[in-house]
Amino acid sequence: MSAATAAWAPQLAARAHLLEGLVPGGAMTEEAEAAWRAPFGEPETWELEISDRDLPGPHGRIPVRIYVPAAPSSAPRPALVWIHGGSFQHGDLDMPEAHEVSRGVAGRADAVVISVFYRLVDEPSGTPAANPDGETGLHAPIPLDDVHAAYTWVREHAAELGVDPARVAIGGASAGGDLAACASIRLADEGAAPWQSFLMYPVAHIEMPEATAEEAAALAACAPLGGFPFEAVARMGEAYNGRPRAEATGYEFPALAARHDHLPPTLVDVAEFDGLRPSGRAYAEQLEVAGVDVELVLSRGVPHGHLNKVGLAEAHASMDRMARRLRER
C-alpha cells in the first residue's frame, strides 16, 4: 500500500492523487503540498469575545489569547488552558491548531479557553526560534515554566475570567500535548492537579516505543507523511532539553515520570497515520496501569496534526470530544 492508496478519511482521500509517486524520504512539490494542506472549508463561526493579553511568568511575559462565549452565563464556566504544537520550535497563537481549536472548543462547550504562547527553542540546526521578544538559546524547563505559570494564573484569576476554579482543564497537541502532560504531572506533584487533561497526538517519549503490528502497517502505508522517525524524535528531544537524551526526565517527557497515579482524568487522541501514534498509545496504557481514568481514541484516516486542517471532519470530531468532556464531567 502506498501513501496515495492508504485508507484516508474521505476529505483527504479526495486529495490522495497528490501523493502518487511519493516515496519514503521524498518531498512533495510546492504546488502539491499547498493543495494537500489547503483548508477543507471556511472557518467555523462562533459568537465569542476574543482578547490578547500578557500574563506574568518567571521568564517574562507570556502572551495568551482568551476566548469567552459572548452570551452571558448565570454560573461560572469550565475552562481549558490550551497549548499549541510545533516540535517545541515553531507555532503561534494564530495557527489553526491554536486559534481555530480554541474557538471551536469554546463555542462547542460554552467554555472559556486560554491559548498559551510558550517560549520556543531553537531548531537542532541552530536556526533561532521566532519568539516575540527575540529570545534564543532557550531549553527546558522554560517552555514548561511558561505553561505552568499560565495555568496557575488562570486558576488564581478564575473569578475575573468567569470560570469555576475547580473545573480548569489543560490540553495540547503534539509538543503542546507533551507540555500539557508534563504540566499535569508537575501540578499533581505540587498537590494541585488539573481538573482533567486532553492530549492530542502527543509526543510522550524521547525514545519512541515499539509500534504494534497494526501501527507499523499504518505507518508504512503513509511513510512519506507520517514523519517522526525515531532518530528525528530523539534529536528534537535533545534540542528541547539542551542535553543528552539519557538525561531527560518526566518534566520533559511524561512517560519518564516516576509516578502517574495522581494524575487527573485524561483524554489521549492519536492519529492513525502518525509516527507519534505509538507514543500516545503507550502513554495511555501507562496511565491505565497506574489507575488513571484514561480514554484512548484513534482518529482514523488522518496524519499527524489534523487539528491544523480547517474544515476537516475529523478535526471537528476531536474538538467535539474535548467539548463534551468540558460540558459533562
Image (cartoon, grey):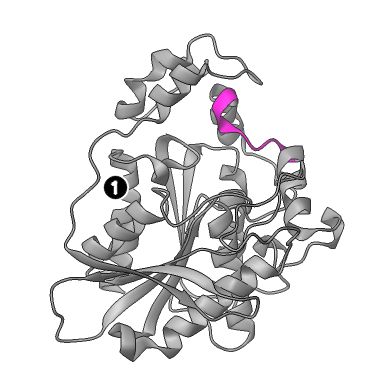
Q: Is residue 44 left or right of residue 152?
A: left
**Range drawn in magenta:** 224-230
Residue at the (40%, 18%) spot, across then down? 16
User: Is residue 225 covered in magenta?
Assistant: yes
Element type where label 1 sits in the image: helix
Residue at the (69%, 54%) spot, across then down? 205
Q: Position of residue 125 (x, y in %)?
A: 77, 41
Residue at the (67%, 62%) spot, across then down? 135
Q: Residue furthest front?
A: 133
User: Is residue 301 covered in magenta?
Assistant: no
**Residue 284 shows in the view:** no
Q: Position of residue 50 (x, y in %)?
A: 28, 66
Q: Is residue 175 above or below residue 288?
A: above
Question: Counting other residues with Cα less than 10 Å from the Cα at mark 1, is it few (<14), some (14-19), or many (20 or more)?
Answer: some
Q: Residue furthest top?
A: 21
**Residue 36 shows in the view:** yes
Q: Position of residue 103 (x, y in %)?
A: 29, 59
Amino acid type at circle 1 is: His
Residue under pointer 1: 316
Q: Position of residue 1 (x, y in %)?
A: 52, 15
Which image quadrant: the C terminus? Answer: bottom left
* The one of 62 and 13 positioned closer to us in this rendering: 62
Q: Is residue 207 left or right of residue 119?
A: right
Instruction: Report which quarter residue 14 is drawn in.
Output: top left
Q: Is residue 274 left or right of residue 323?
A: right
Q: Is residue 135 above or below residue 276?
A: below
Residue at the (63%, 69%) spot, across then down? 144
